[in-house]
Image (tube, rainbow, N blue to C red):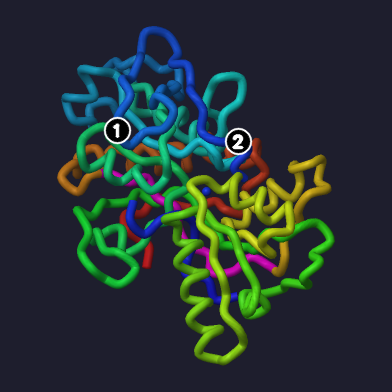
Amino acid sequence: MTASTTRRTTAARSRVAAVGAIAVAGALVLTACGDQTNGGTGTDSGKTAAGSSAPLFAKLPKKYQDSGVIKVGTDATYAPMEYEEGGQIVGVDPDIAAALGKELGVKFQFTSGTFDGLISSLNTGRQDIVMSSMSDTKARQEGLDDKGKKTGKGVDFVDYFTSGVSLLVKKGNPSKITSLDDLCGKKVAVQRGTIYEDTFKAQAAKCTKAGKGALAIEAFDTDPEAQTRVKSGGAVADLNDYPIAAHIAKTAGGGNDFEVAGGQTDAGPFGIAVNKDNTQLRDALKDALDAIIKNGEYAKVLEKWDVKNSAVTEATVNAGK
């Protein structure tokens, strides 16, 4: 497979359900924003209150020292990375954020919205960071679309996870899909605005050039919609990061709905997106990530969610290609 790095959009991931309203813990309530879905309500990750006793509290900009909160944009439909359960946003990313919060002395308040609006919510100031299994790519760093055209302000990434991509097909793999090349002349389903959609578009061009039959692409607002299309037989495959594809195959329909076709390929970093003007926050997050890698809290989170193979050994900034 020749996919283009990993998850999620160039402009702006098993989804277990469509984005829903989230209850905000305690007194922290975030007002709905234009690019957020279903009210834009959120949840807090981490129990550490703001205070100077936290090891890295002094590294934070005063804004966050005063508020005790870092607002996080996410798309909570991407188990096991981030998803809704019991009225809260849970998963790998919220747990890593909670560990970061202990080092920094602040709470990470997650709010769910559509994935392709997350970078916009960051650059308009509605969110402080994006933590949503977002692939760190040069295009996102520079604010470019898939054709290299400038579409907005770029972002910086603190890279905290690594993942490749895999095809998700109907259980039994009736179309015998093993690679992207097997998709020529067929129809696929994918979440709109994601790198996966870009990968399918690139493959469609390759199929046409080779005279192997057109690849039709159906794009949906959420990945669960794309999954439903594959399950019904209306499309032969969806594309996702390997941990998510494996989780969907294991859990959807008791493991009877889907399977992963082919292997994991083109591993690349997921990053915490930060506004380029907010370098102090970026550097504080990097230091906090290094701290939880060193003290073992990072490894505990990945072991809990069975994604140890996606661990990084140190925090990096803008390491994506």
What are the residue bounds of the magenta stretch? 263-274
Q: What residue is disc 1 on?
A: 34
Q: Residue 223 in magenta?
A: no
Residue type highlighted by circle 2: Ala
The residue carrying pointer 1 sits among few (fewer than 14), some (14 to 19) or many (20 or more) residues within 10 Å by Cα, namely: few
- Name the spot of residue 224 as percent of width and height, x first: 60, 45
In the image, what residue occupies the spot 81% across and 46% down?
Answer: 255
Quadrant where the N terminus is found in the figure: bottom right
Quadrant where the C terminus is found in the figure: bottom left
- Name the spot of residue 193 as percent of width and height, x first: 42, 56
Q: Would residue 169 be seen by someone viewing this image from the given angle?
A: yes
In the rendered image of this protein, does residue 103 appear above or below residue 48? below
The image quarter containing residue 173 is bottom right
Q: Would residue 283 be seen by someone viewing this image from the given angle?
A: no
Residue in front for this viewpoint, 295 or 157:
157
Secondary structure mainly formed by the magenta segment: strand
Q: What residue is disc 2 on?
A: 17
- Name the spot of residue 95 as percent of width and height, x first: 52, 31
**Of helix, strand and loop, which one carries label 2?**
loop
The image quarter containing residue 235 is bottom right
